């Protein structure tokens, strides 16, 4: 008769040990995977590029491609895993220019990009003349290209909501260095420049001084743009401004040479000729009284303040001095002005003679060397 008692189950300790070790190995591998993805750096310690540029309209996959192609991340799969866990792949991508720190983890990188913490760029505006020059300069610093900016800044329909026209849009641009964001649209740029214009005019009693002259800020800017093109010598600008203000008060045409040059677009001319003086344009102040319809270039703060704080003079005329300083001789009467003009012409004629003699001497020297 068989026994009803069962024999004790034999434990295969070797198999159990192997199983436990395998389970621990898998857990360790998975744990390390989580640790690597969440804690270890995925941004290289050394970056070929300091800033990440994300164009407007970029989607999530486009962003990841950019991160990989520009070597901002070491492991794409790790980044995308964390992105899914943080639901970053489901959110709209923020455009802009972002400073990336070497050694960041995936979490740090995603948090930074999701917050949209852009690094500003410095927009440097100096002495640009035309709107097309400003568009070309600005396009170096922000995302919109030159043509997009130019079309916007030249369009009455685009400018109308801002209370601007193609004739006066230059008045919002004052030479300076501005911190802006790379993904500015043309409208963003205009809004920012209007804000800067208001800040500029709110200082140093500029609005009150313009009112005392019987001029609007835009009119002051327009006259300042003429002063800007007359001289680079800042100490002389208040005197030149006084000449033009005296002419405006007396109802005399401004007869400003820079307006003729602007009207004709002939900026390479070495001197103003009858062609320039008779060029038909509302900007030609030899043909039309008063200020031109708008600025003929950007005007610096020095030129604007020269108009707002002119010298007290009764000068009506000025011309270049008979020297090489770039400064001017001023006169109260036409007779005095004609004397100054004669002196300058004699000086220029003498320079031409000296230049011709120097060229002849150089030619003779070359011939003697050849012989």
Image: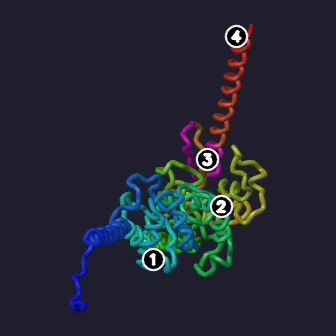
Dot 2 and dot 4 residues touching (CB under 8 Å): no
Dot 1 and dot 2 residues touching (CB under 8 Å): no
- Percent x, y of residue 99: 42, 62
Q: Looking at the image, tell me whether mark 4 or mark 1 is earlier in sequence order.
A: 1
The boundaries of the magenta stretch are 324-340
Q: State the colouring used for the structure image.
A: rainbow
Quadrant of image for the C terminus: top right
- Percent x, y of residue 248: 60, 65
Q: Looking at the image, tell me whether mark 3 or mark 2 is earlier in sequence order.
A: 2
Residue furthest to the front: 1
Query: Of tags 3 and 2, which is closer to the observer?
Result: 2
Q: Secondary structure at mark 3?
A: strand
Query: Of tags 4 and 1, which is closer to the observer?
Result: 1
Is 328 placed left or right of 20 in the picture?
right
Q: Looking at the image, tell me whether mark 2 or mark 4 is earlier in sequence order.
A: 2
In this view, the residue in front, 84 or 316, is 84
Dot 3 and dot 1 residues touching (CB under 8 Å): no
Say few, some or many: other residues with alpha carbon within 10 Å of mark 4 (under 14 / 14 to 19 / 20 or more). Answer: few
Cα separation between marks 4 and 1: 81 Å
Query: Of tags 3 and 4, which is closer to the observer?
Result: 4
Q: Which residue is mark 1?
A: 84
Cα separation between marks 1 and 2: 45 Å
Give me the disc on residue 132: 2
Q: Which residue is mark 4?
A: 369
Give me the disc on residue 30: none
In terms of image quadrants, where is residue 69?
A: bottom right
Residue 228 vertical position relative to residue 196 in the rendered view, above or below: above
Q: Looking at the image, tell me whether mark 3 or mark 1 is earlier in sequence order.
A: 1
């Amino acid at each position: 008769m068989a026994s009803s008692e069962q024999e004790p189950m034999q434990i295969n300790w070797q198999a159990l040990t192997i199983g436990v070790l395998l389970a621990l190995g898998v857990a360790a591998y998975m744990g390390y995977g989580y640790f690597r993805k969440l804690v270890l750096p995925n941004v290289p310690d050394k970056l070929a590029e300091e800033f990440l540029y994300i164009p407007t309209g970029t989607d999530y996959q486009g962003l990841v491609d950019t991160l990989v192609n520009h070597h901002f991340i070491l492991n794409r799969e790790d980044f995308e895993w964390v992105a899914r866990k943080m639901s970053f792949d489901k959110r709209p991508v923020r455009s802009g220019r972002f400073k990336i720190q070497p050694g960041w983890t995936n979490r740090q990188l995603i948090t930074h990009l999701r917050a949209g913490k852009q690094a500003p760029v410095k927009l440097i505006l100096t002495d640009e003349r035309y709107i097309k020059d400003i568009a070309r300069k600005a396009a170096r610093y922000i995302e919109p290209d030159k043509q997009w900016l130019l079309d916007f800044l030249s369009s009455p329909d685009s400018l109308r909501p801002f209370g601007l026209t193609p004739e006066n849009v230059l008045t919002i641009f004052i030479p300076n260095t501005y911190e802006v964001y790379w993904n500015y649209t043309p409208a963003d740029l205009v809004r920012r420049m209007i804000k800067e214009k208001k800040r500029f005019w709110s200082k140093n009693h500029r609005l009150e001084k313009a009112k005392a002259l019987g001029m609007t800020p835009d009119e002051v800017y327009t006259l300042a743009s003429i002063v800007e093109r007359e001289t680079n010598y800042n100490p002389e600008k208040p005197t030149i401004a006084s000449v033009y203000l005296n002419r405006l008060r007396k109802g005399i045409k401004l007869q400003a040479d820079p307006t003729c040059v602007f009207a004709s677009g002939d900026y390479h001319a070495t001197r103003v000729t009858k062609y320039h003086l008779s060029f038909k344009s509302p900007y030609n102040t030899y043909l039309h009284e008063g200020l031109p319809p708008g600025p003929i270039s950007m005007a610096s703060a020095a030129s604007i303040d020269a108009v707002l704080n002119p010298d007290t003079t009764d000068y009506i005329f000025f011309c270049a001095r008979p020297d090489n300083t770039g400064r001017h001789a001023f006169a109260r009467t036409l007779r005095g002005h004609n004397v100054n003009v004669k002196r300058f012409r004699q000086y220029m004629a003498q320079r031409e003679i000296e230049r011709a003699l120097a060229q002849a001497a150089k030619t003779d020297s070359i011939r003697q060397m050849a012989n």
